[in-house]
Image (cartoon, grey):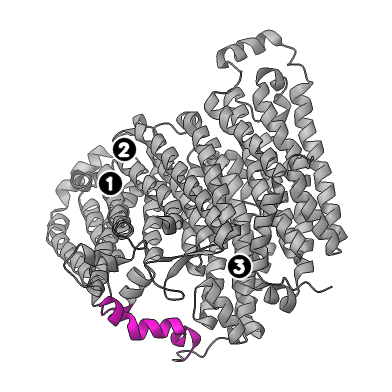
Amino acid sequence: MVDQYPAIVLLAPFFAAIAVSLLGNWKSGFCLPLTVLSLVISLMSSIALLGQVAESGEVVYLLGGWPRPYGIEFRVDPLNGLLLVVICTIALLSSIYSIRAAAVETPDKCPQFYTLYLLLVTGLLGMSMTGDAFNLYVLVEVASLTSYALIAMRSKRAVLASFNYIIMGTIGASFYLLGVGYLYMKTGSLNMVDIREVLLESGLYTSETILVAFMMIMVGVWIKMAFFPLHGWLPNAYSYAPSTASCVLAPLVTKVTVYVMIRMMFTVFGPEYVFVYLGWSDVVVWMAIVAILAGSILALAQTDLKKMLSYLIVAEVGYMVGGVWLANETALVGAIYHVISDAFMTLCLFLAAGAIITKTGKYCIKDMEGLFRKMPWTMVGFVIAALSMIGIPPTCGFFSKWYLINGGIEAGNWGYVAALLISSLINAILFFRVIEVAYFKKESTDSDKEETVSGSSGVGEPPLTMLGPLLVTAVCLLLIGIFNQEIVILIRQAVSSFGPLGFIG
Amino acid sequence: MRALGTIAVILTGALLLYASGDFPAWGEPYSPANDSRVSRHYILKSFEETSVPNMVTAVLADYRSYDTLFETVVIFTAGIAIISILRGPVDKRVRLRRASEKSLRQSNLILAQTCRLLVPVIQMFALYVIAHGHHSPGGGFQGGVIFGASLILVALSFQLQTALDRISEKRAMILAGIGVLIYSGIGLTCVLLGSNFLDYSVLSKVLPLSAIEARSYGILGVETGVAFTVTAIMFAIYANLSSHGRMKGGL
């Protein structure tokens, strides 16, 4: 039982997906309980797995019983152990949220919706657990196909946004696959650890093919994570998607892809190749600085709440890419910590936005007037997430920025530090603008007209199944912030296993 | 925008050309991909370890079986995705081209009879390809596509409805789910028998086979699952795309 935890984490949502697709057509009442149950099982075993990893180091699970490098293996270290817990928690919270939202947004497609939802979670869990470069591609495909479908399920606009995403996503995946193909051509192996060994043994650092393979893989994951200027697909896709889908897509897909980038850089190619031999870190950090600023400024230009949040994701991706490429331990710890905290912040914001939009039916920031009076608890969740995005102390956003900024100072990259501070200021403007409208602005003057509308739609607190996950997420934001020490110790354990980061001067 | 696209294409092309300078020679038998530890192991040991004469099948469905499971899931997902996007509200299903259908049915005696003759042969061949994957090129994906093609042929040469009468879309999706379930169920049985996921050798505990032979039969089992899924999804995708998700009319 104990040594099967990695399998249980992945297989619980996977079998639930098959069960939902088989039983759901017969009785759609089965969908939701199965989904929630499987995610609870998955969450519990991922926590147990993380405990196991924290205690005794890396856990390897051989699929089919074939030893490395002949078969495929799951490799769980503290880094992806943490990520698994985050994925399971977020998937569980959004699935509870979906009880009402899915019934409204995608009626009579319930079985399909939950099958795709569970397969998406399976894909993301598989992406974070696998120790095989090609297997990663297969699971990226599962995760992407399901997200295209989930986005397109709602409306005509969403179909177009999803089509853009399909084109961009497929290009990204093809780049990644081409890179893996080149790697295989030179090393003859697909296992991540094995590839690194072969690269070192056969002295392949000078090979042009390996260089191009690295570039292809990086461009591929950058497209997938919407790294500016490759972000074109993201804002529309996430803002037009059904709100349950965007609640699980927005926090997870980009973050898991950032994890894939870290895995590729540190486990497959190795920091000594990426930082010492290539020495491009400055260029990429400057790209990240541009991404942070561009994302923030574009967010400032939005009037639609969900679009604004989507552009913020673009800026946050810049934080993480920059942190990873600063090539020192503090910044890397900060970037990984930010992956976790940003996943929860984004979830919290999208849950709040989803609740507001379902209750009021309004998308624009300027229509949010008087929301504090109508739905105070929802706005409490929103404000906590906003404070975390800005980086106010007890929330986790502060600590991740703290590590990132310290890392930037350590690396002597003042541009990155400045970009982080400017982007925090812009976040403050963005969120206080929303809060100002929602708190201070009186409802519109033609009050009798307003009343009839609000009377019929009954604007008030959203149902408990929406509010619960939102408040739990908000509490998580505080907890992740307060217990940052424990999380950072785990992350450091992972980072130290990557070997020296090879930061020179 | 167009200029940007051109620049991106030229840059990528130049990169690819640059990378090719360091490629192993064309057809080189001792290139890393052919002569690495992994490939050598597959070539020398695969028959000994799995008792499958076809090396490709052994790698695909045993050494890297987990990959293949998720390839099957990708196909399954594609089917569900297309249905969930195309399927509109139920009341929108309108009757299309009723009159033209009738005339079509009467006027194509030759087409109908040819199809009648061909379909059983195609399906027999599909089963052969599935079953013979152990010895020759073939297996679940290829056989499944051929079987699916036979159903599409029925839909093309009669009407979509004729094919749907035999396998409705709902039933096709259930078959697809069962296919994935067969594959992953075999994997799960291995876990329940006390080994790792998809480690077929433990099936020898319940089957009257040696551990090595159990691997071979495990592969046959998962190939069957793949064939179910591929057949059903091929047909479901065709039925949905050709009728805009209305399941009426068709091409």
x and y percent of residue A468 in the render?
A: 57, 29
Q: Secondary structure at mark 2?
A: loop
The nearer-to-camera label among 1 and 3 is 3
* Quadrant hosting residue A256: bottom right
Q: Are marks 2 and 3 in contact (CB under 8 Å)?
A: no
Q: CA gap, disc 2 to disc 3?
A: 40 Å
Asked whether the viewer can see residue A109, the reply is no
Q: Residue at x 55, y 77 (%)?
A: A195
- The residue labelled by disc 2 is A25
- Chain ID for label 3? A
- The residue labelled by disc 3 is A264
Stretch of the chain drawn in magenta = B30-55
Q: Residue at x 61, y 51 (%)?
A: A233
Residue B33 in magenta stretch: yes
Residue count near mark 2 (Cα–Cα under 10 Å), binned few <14, some 14–19, many ≥20: some
* Quadrant hosting residue B46: bottom left
- Chain ID for label 2? A
Q: Are marks 2 and 1 in contact (CB under 8 Å)?
A: yes
Q: Residue at x 28, y 53 (%)?
A: B232
x and y percent of residue B104 in the render?
A: 20, 47
- The residue labelled by disc 1 is B174
